[in-house]
Image (cartoon, rainbow, N blue to C red):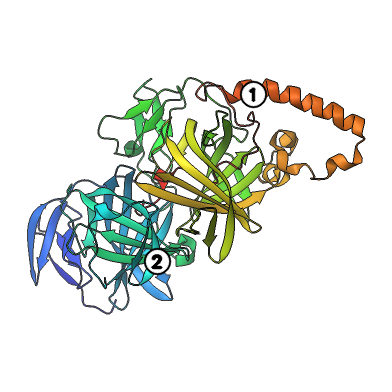
Amino acid sequence: MTERSYRAPCPGCGAPVEFRSAQSTHAVCPYCQSTVLRQGEVLSRIGRMAELFDDHSPLQLMASGRFDTQPFVLIGRLQYKSPAGVWAEWIALFEDGSQAFLSEDNGAYVMARPRELQREMPPASAFRPGASTAVNGQPFTVAFSDQVCLISAQGELPRLPPLGFAFGLVELRSDSGEVLSLDYSRTPPALSAGRSVRLEDLALSGLKDASVKNEAGRQFNCPHCGAPVEITLASTKTLTCRSCNSLIDVSQGLGGELRHALQDEPVAPLIALGSLGRLEGVDWQVVGFQHRMGREPGDDELFGWEEYLLYNRQRGFSFLVDATDGWSLVRPLTGAPKLDASGRAATYLGTRYELQYRYDAETSYACGEFYWPVARGQKTSNRDFASAKGLLSEESTPNEITWSGGSRLDAATVAKAFKLEARQDLLRRADVAPAGSFRALGWGTILIIAVLLIVLVLLLSRCSRCDPALENCSSSGYRSSGGAYGGYSGSGGSHK
């Protein structure tokens, strides 16, 4: 780096503490966890930092890479907590002395740089998810607004909110894929602007060895049955016990009481957890599975679908969605599509998508590991959009809106990807039937089929009124629903 680094003894233990950036005002001693304040050439101890939450990220201090052709090195890490769990923000120091923030976002990453605000901003409480606003003359949609707090830090840092102090954080997203963050831990709030990045495109070196992990820190006993439970994924917030199927919330760490919910009626996924498959040129592992139920406004009938959470160490997470009208592969979007005044169309990256369905969704069963806190009975309000180019889905809660996007897959592609050709008939969905397939049939045959379909609908309607906590209704509804094209809205926003 071109800047001169500064090193001095830690006021707490005497070990060397190094500052590589002139913008860094704080550092955490790696030996005694003292929080050190730098004032000119003098270091003073102002407290002790809490232990880091073990998130198993492949990133670590001093990992280096390139962004927009500029070399950088990771010099610090901040860990935050919100009602949706814990996430990290890494401080990247560039060769020219500037800094950026490499942050977790919906199971992927965003690289953001500080920006100057050109006008006074309203308080964080004034931002309502889904509302439109303008920042520095550019239109954005509010995606997240809630209280967060700093729980731990590591390395050297350009800012350091008081430990455990709750402050407002607002996420704004645009239809061009840009994400803004307003940090209200100071006055005026700090603004950063960024875009989605893939770790593989950052040409990173010095990452953690994937085979090295602290087993003791990632194992615990199930709070319901006492069986050993192991966390294997980076940033897991929820997982299930393999012995009793209890859904366990670990979003607040493993040191305190673990919340859990019993699941006595397992739903068997067609693609087993741990399965490996190759889709769109990427190798994925199935790490989580959800069964979800939906209901359209004013309709008493329920419909269901299933979501497989896929993981790749470099690409992060995607969702393989199994709905009655076909399969789709989607992932959360960094930006937020722009809705027209009627809400019946959305535009993203220059493509217009038309509204297909509007419904309320609820999680009825989950197994595996998830990067957001999953709970039975978790509810979202959903809208699905489609175009010739692909799919969009919006999921919203009172504090957050998450968008997902992707494309359709045929059953043969899914079967081949996961080596399930022998079970391909079980993977077939309504989308494989040709639209004009009845034309070759006689009227008598068509009449018989119609009668059989009416009887079948009457029989299946029993399941459409079933308790989603007791039965698997993913293919039992009368409606051919696209379902939700990816995750729960608590999984997105606020660089989580």
Q: Quadrant of residue 246?
A: top left
Q: Is residue 109 left or right of residue 426?
A: left
Badge 2 or badge 1: first in the primary sequence: 2
Viewer can see residue 12: no
Q: Nearer the viewer, residue 211 or 74?
A: 74
> Disc 2 designates what residue?
139
Q: Quadrant of the N terminus?
A: bottom left
Q: Quadrant of residue 334?
A: bottom left
The crowd level at tag 2 (other Cα within 10 Å; few <14, some 14-19, many 20+) is some
> Disc 1 designates what residue?
461
As helix, strand or loop, the secondary structure at mark 2 comes to strand
Q: Is residue 316 above or below residue 267?
A: below
The crowd level at tag 1 (other Cα within 10 Å; few <14, some 14-19, many 20+) is some
Q: Is residue 255 above or below residue 346?
A: above
Q: Residue at x 83, y 29 (%)?
A: 449
Residue type pointed to by label 2: Pro
* Contact (Cβ within 8 Å) of mark 2 with mark 1: no
Residue type pointed to by label 1: Ser
Q: Is residue 232 left or right of residue 135?
A: right
Where is residue 253? Give x, y as percent: 29, 38
Where is residue 182? Give x, y as percent: 28, 60
Viewer can see residue 98: yes
Q: Residue at x 57, y 36 (%)?
A: 306
Where is residue 61? Give x, y as percent: 31, 59
Q: Nearer the viewer, residue 232 or 88?
A: 88
Q: Residue at x 21, y 77 (%)?
A: 4
Q: Is residue 121 left or right of residue 13?
A: right
Where is residue 100? Give x, y as percent: 32, 67
Q: CA distance from mark 2 to mark 1?
A: 45 Å
As helix, strand or loop, the secondary structure at mark 1 comes to helix
Q: Is residue 5 above or below residue 182?
A: below
Q: Is residue 76 above or below residue 148?
A: below
